[in-house]
Image (cartoon, helix red, strand yellow):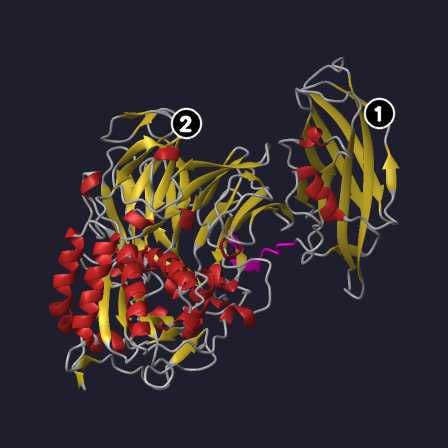
């Protein structure tokens, strides 16, 4: 017989076990307690029967819908009530994956994700599909869009794990994250108990992973994007491929670091491993990475070709204050990073961290410094800056008393009168700021006044609290235009905020989750964009259009949209030093003219200024849609190119291109050869014929330290006629 089933009814029985487990000292004692509990609940005259899944629900990772009565008798089932935006739900997924490695469906265990959405956007199956891929979920997932089972069982928060017996009988539940040991003990005991009773069935349930039906793509759920100070190199967090890409403006891949599988390892570019990296920021020739699911901050040294760990211990931390040296400080799900200053000067001596897992903003000191209302910190210290650690939408003049809700994007605005870091606070659906003068946390747009209401979301343009957002994941500051851009991720829009008036308006996107490219902002569509970066002196806004697996380029002057063509089809080995990568990307045709130049006398530390003059045939023009570019190489003397910009776009041939190469101060060979290649795509003016042509210049150098002046000039000319 079955009784009315709810977690409330179960708690009256389970509470006694929970208290007993707290007092138990040994694993054996805990196992005995659970075994006795199972005998008690299993011996009830009436089972607490879990309601059946509704017919017509959408399922992923299975060959068809599953039924507790038809497909799952004889199985111990773990129901994971989750919503894909929730950081706590993400923290539970590695535990479930490990549990599935210990006990499969053939052992009698089945894990089912019951997706019960918080935001309206999360009810859409295509968005859940993207989340299943992003988080590498390999167990069945059902889209309970109306949260019917959630309500029938009286589930109250995300995540909640419910253990069901082989008769569909309710056995046990845990609420929130951090219950791995209890869950593992209970599942193992339930499998043993019901095996002894002869009630388990060991057959497979018919899995069909959604990921196996998809074609490969160059990018997979790119989370964030940034650029170096010159704007010549972009850095993409290729989150789904667990790697970092460094690409030229043309889209050519210069470095691929990590991937394609997740892992945790320092070392060279080919051996290093990340786990769903998100935030990226460049400082000179180093890249700092929020290695989110490894709970680490990593540093990529482009000159040395090495990856190292600068903060975190590789497991999720619960410390909400910090203060230890980076590699000894546990941290939790860092989602974004940004460079800034802590102190009286403008030196960028601190790495700001959006610590989504503890709902705080942290700081990693790159040099000695001091936080507002804080004490002096030594280089390497990793410490909390703002946020109590409570998941709230609470503003306060004292940074440690403020509350955030899964902060996911950072945008420093050091200029007066702002002198703050803008924050995309995703779970409160707000954009906030924290002052770099006194640490005060203030509201800008979105949300509502009640700090405990995290359900004040929508899609409304307006001022301050009258504006509504839905789970924003990124912000980017444009000092040239005095504008702040926000990725209103679950509304599939890019919005612009005037921090003076607090006016928030739609800049691009229709609100539809799609992938239309222009021609204008209002005709373009996005799908959960997660990253933003302002480049080209405020003219360009780069968008990591996450679920479309693209980087989109918004021209803020012409109001047009294009897609960055990430090109690596010709890369033989992406995990190489910069100069080799460029050389292999070019793959010049055998017919390419090779022009030998006269030797040029130079000195160590001197700059070589190259004027590259190219002329197209009459009646032709460059093809805008194809990436014409130049590149430097050094024929075995790669030391010559360390720290150089080795490639660049060719957009206009009406005047010579200026390329600068610096001669290193440390000389390894006295007579290297600097090679300059150019690859141009052009069409006849009428567009009837298009072609690609290339040329290679070989410029021998004589490094004798006798050359005078800071600059050595050389002119390279070629007529493609």
Q: In terms of depth relative to the viewer, which is nearer, 269 or 250?
A: 269
Q: Position of residue 511 (x, y in %)?
A: 41, 68
Q: Is residue 375 above or below residue 391?
A: above
Q: Is residue 655 above or below residue 376?
A: below
Q: In terms of depth relative to the viewer, which is nearer, 534 or 292?
A: 292
Q: Is residue 60 above or below residue 29?
A: below
Q: In terms of depth relative to the viewer, which is nearer, 183 or 26?
A: 26
Is residue 254 visible in the rendered structure shown here?
yes
Q: In terms of depth relative to the viewer, which is nearer, 366 or 199?
A: 199
Q: Residue at x 29, y 83 (%)?
A: 52
Could you tell whether 547 is left or right of 588 in the image? left
Specify few, some or many for label 2: CA neighbours under 10 Å numbering under 14, 14-19, or 20 or more. Answer: few
Contact between marks 2 and 1 (CB within 8 A): the answer is: no
Q: Residue furthest top?
A: 706
Local secondary structure at mark 2: loop
Q: Residue at x 49, y 68 (%)?
A: 523
Is residue 119 visible in the rendered structure shown here?
no
Q: Residue at x 49, y 49 (%)?
A: 263
Local secondary structure at mark 1: loop
Q: Is residue 410 magenta?
A: no
Could you tell whether 719 is left or right of 621 in the image? right
**Mark closest to the chain's N terminus, 2 or 1:** 2
* Residue stretch in magenta: 553-567
Q: Is residue 562 magenta?
A: yes
Q: Position of residue 597 (x, y in %)?
A: 86, 31
Q: Tell me the tag on residue 478.
A: none
The quarter of the displayed image where residue 620 is located: bottom right
Q: Which residue corresponds to mark 1?
A: 599
Q: Which residue corresponds to mark 2?
A: 347
- Distance from Cα at disc 2 to Cα at disc 1: 41 Å
């Amino acid at each position: 017989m079955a009784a009315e089933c709810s977690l409330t009814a179960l708690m009256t029985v389970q509470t006694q076990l929970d208290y007993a487990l707290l007092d138990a000292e040994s694993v054996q004692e805990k196992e005995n307690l659970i075994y006795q509990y199972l005998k008690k609940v299993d011996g009830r005259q009436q089972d607490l029967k879990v309601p059946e899944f509704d017919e017509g629900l959408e399922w992923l990772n299975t060959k068809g819908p599953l039924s507790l009565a038809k497909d799952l008798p004889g199985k111990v089932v773990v129901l994971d009530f989750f919503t894909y935006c929730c950081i706590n739900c993400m923290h539970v997924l590695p535990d479930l994956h490990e549990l599935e490695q210990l006990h499969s469906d053939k052992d009698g265990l089945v894990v089912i994700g019951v997706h019960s959405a918080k935001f309206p956007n999360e009810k859409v199956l295509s968005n859940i599909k993207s989340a299943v891929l992003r988080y590498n979920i390999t167990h069945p997932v059902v889209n309970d869009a109306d949260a019917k089972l959630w309500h029938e069982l009286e589930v109250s928060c995300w995540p909640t794990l419910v253990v069901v017996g082989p008769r569909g009988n309710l056995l046990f539940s845990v609420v929130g994250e951090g219950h791995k040991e209890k869950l593992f003990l209970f599942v193992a005991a339930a499998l043993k108990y019901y095996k002894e009773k002869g009630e388990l069935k060991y057959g497979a349930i018919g899995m069909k992973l959604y990921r196996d039906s998809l074609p490969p793509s160059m990018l997979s759920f790119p989370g964030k994007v940034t650029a170096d100070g010159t704007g010549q190199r972009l850095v993409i967090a290729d989150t789904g491929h667990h790697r970092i890409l460094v690409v030229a403006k043309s889209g050519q891949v210069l470095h691929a670091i990590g991937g394609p599988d997740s892992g945790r390892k320092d070392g060279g570019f080919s051996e290093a491993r990340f786990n769903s990296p998100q935030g990226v920021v460049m400082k000179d020739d180093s890249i700092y990475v929020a290695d989110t699911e490894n709970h680490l901050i990593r540093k990529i040294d482009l000159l040395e070709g090495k990856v190292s760990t600068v903060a975190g211990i590789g497991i999720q931390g619960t410390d909400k204050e910090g203060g230890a040296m980076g590699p000894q400080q546990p941290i939790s799900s860092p989602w974004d990073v940004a460079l800034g200053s802590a102190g009286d000067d403008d030196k960028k001596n601190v790495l700001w961290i959006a610590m989504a897992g503890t709902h705080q903003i942290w700081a990693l000191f790159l040099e000695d410094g001091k936080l507002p209302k804080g004490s002096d910190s030594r280089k390497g210290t990793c410490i909390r800056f703002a946020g109590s650690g409570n998941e709230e939408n609470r503003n306060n003049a004292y940074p440690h008393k403020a509350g955030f809700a899964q902060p996911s994007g950072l945008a420093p605005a050091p200029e007066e009168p702002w002198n703050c870091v803008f924050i995309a606070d995703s779970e409160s659906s707000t954009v906030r700021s924290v002052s770099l003068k006194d640490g005060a946390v203030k509201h800008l747009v979105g949300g509502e006044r009640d700090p405990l209401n995290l359900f004040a979301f929508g899609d409304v343009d307006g001022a301050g609290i009258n504006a509504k957002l839905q789970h924003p994941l990124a912000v980017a500051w444009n000092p040239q235009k005095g504008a702040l851009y926000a990725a209103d991720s679950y509304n599939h829009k890019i919005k612009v905020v005037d921090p003076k008036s607090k006016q928030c308006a739609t800049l691009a996107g229709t609100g539809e989750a799609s992938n239309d490219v222009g021609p204008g902002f209002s005709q373009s569509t996005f799908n959960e964009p997660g990253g933003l970066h302002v480049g080209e002196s405020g003219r360009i806004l780069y968008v990591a259009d996450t679920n479309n697996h693209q980087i989109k380029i918004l021209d803020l002057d012409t109001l047009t949209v294009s897609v960055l063509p990430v090109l690596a089809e010709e890369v033989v080995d992406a995990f190489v030093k910069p100069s080799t990568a460029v050389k292999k990307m070019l793959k010049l045709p055998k017919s390419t003219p090779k022009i030998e130049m006269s030797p040029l006398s130079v000195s160590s530390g001197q700059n070589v200024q190259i004027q590259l003059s190219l002329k197209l045939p009459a009646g032709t023009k460059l093809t805008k849609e194809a990436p014409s570019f130049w590149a430097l190489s050094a024929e075995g003397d790669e030391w010559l190119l360390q720290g150089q910009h080795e490639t660049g776009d060719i957009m206009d041939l009406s005047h010579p291109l200026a390329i600068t190469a610096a001669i290193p101060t440390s000389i390894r060979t006295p007579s290297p050869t600097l090679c300059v290649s150019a690859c141009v795509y052009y069409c006849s003016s009428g567009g009837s014929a298009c072609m690609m042509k290339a040329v290679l210049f070989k410029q021998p150098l004589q490094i004798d330290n006798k050359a005078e002046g800071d600059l050595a000039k050389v002119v390279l000319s070629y007529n493609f006629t």
